[in-house]
Image: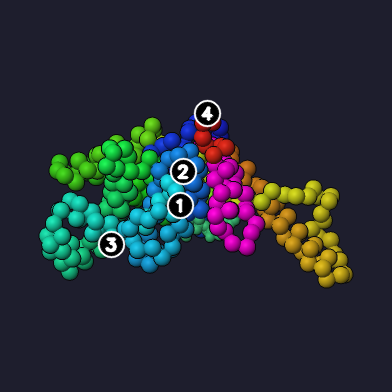
Amino acid sequence: MPEPDSVKAKPHDLLTRRFIAVTGKGGTGKSAVSAAIAFAAATLGRRVLVASIQRYEKTTGFLGAGAPAGEVFEVQNNVFAVNITPKAALREYGLMILRFERLYRRVFEDTLVRYLMEALPSLEELVMIGKAWYHTQERQETGAWRYDTVVLDMQSTGHALSMLSLPATITKAAPPGPLRSKAKEILAAVTDPKRASLCVVTTPEETPVNEAAEICERNAAEAGMPPGFLFVNRVIEPEFGPSELDLGAELPPRALLRTAFVCASFRERVARSQSGHLARAQRDIPLPAVILPEVFSEEFGTAELAALSKIITEHCHGSV
Ligand SMILES: Nc1ncnc2c1ncn2[C@@H]1O[C@H](COP(=O)(O)OP(=O)(O)OP(=O)(O)O)[C@@H](O)[C@H]1O
Ligand SMILES: [Mg+2]
């Protein structure tokens, strides 16, 4: 475990970074936080693309659920989304490098080559990060960047780290050639503290906090991305003191009161069990922590994202 406080990364103005990678344990809210960061940056007038890494063609992204892989679409003013799958990235990257579709077909759709690609998962990862990076380099006709910020909504820990480490690995290990120079270019961009930031999402629970700590350690050792923020998501603050709500008390006899009591006790139990993990995350993880509350609503949609996005602006923008 890293030493508390002394090694914490300094907070920076996240919303003006050009490349923000977001990872964390599965289901902790990576896609929700990526979308909220995008809305926060778009509110400042930046054009933002959320690139969501998806393993399979049937996409489930938060902003782009069901959208065809590889296609950029506008979610709202200044917010764009794209789902990046290995197949679509391979195809586009193949086209980008090889330029001719016929040649692409011959090279990439050949059964043997396809088989080899599937057997070499790092190649899939390289084309996916390559595609995400490519979007940071796109320009409009006016010469301005097409996207001021690209938020990379990544998969959980293992996959994300092997993807982020790939440019460094290839730069070190590959023989000189186009692959190595591309990897070197991506490496320079993703490790540049002025341009990039690696943010981690956790919930205040045992395993997600452990994974968040592991991400930070492995990032420092393997990928070298500039450390960003830790988003502790779905936090429920305790509402009662121990003397105000006795969790072991007998249930009230009347049905409505009984239901209310059960709900309040449940909420309080969760809040109390979260508090130790929240404190551990704030103390042991070497990133400045931002607390994002559990938003109680029937559906998690635009209004809920806007609430998170407001908190992100308050804590991650300006002279933080
Ligand atoms: N702060 C929050 N308050 C309430 N619900 C939330 C919050 N953050 C996320 N959720 C809920 O949790 C669900 C999972 O969030 P999300 O899809 O962002 O997680 P993920 O880490 O991207 O998951 P995966 O690993 O599958 O990609 C969302 O559909 C949303 O309903
Ligand atoms: Mg997700």
Q: For this rendering, which residue is in front, 229 or 47?
A: 47
Can you tell which of label 2 and label 4 is closer to the viewer?
2
Where, quadrant-wise, is the C terminus in this rendering?
A: top right
User: Label 3 belongs to which residue?
Assistant: 87
Ligand 1 is within 8 Å of the C-beta of the residue at disc 2 = no
Residue 302 drawn at (x, y percent): 54, 55
State how far apart marks 3 and 2 are (Cα).
29 Å
Q: For this rendering, which residue is in front, 260 or 206?
A: 260
State how far apart marks 1 and 4 are (Cα).
28 Å
State how far apart marks 4 and 3 are (Cα).
41 Å
From the viewer's perspective, is 243 left or right of 222? right
Can you tell which of label 3 and label 2 is closer to the viewer?
2
Q: In this view, does 36 lie above or below 287?
A: below
Q: Badge 2 local density, few (<14 within 10 Å), some, or many (20+)?
A: many
User: Label 1 belongs to which residue?
Assistant: 76
Mark toward the start of the polypeptide (4 vs 3): 3
User: Label 4 belongs to which residue?
Assistant: 319
Magenta-tinted stretch? 286-312
**Outermost residue toward the front in this view:** 142
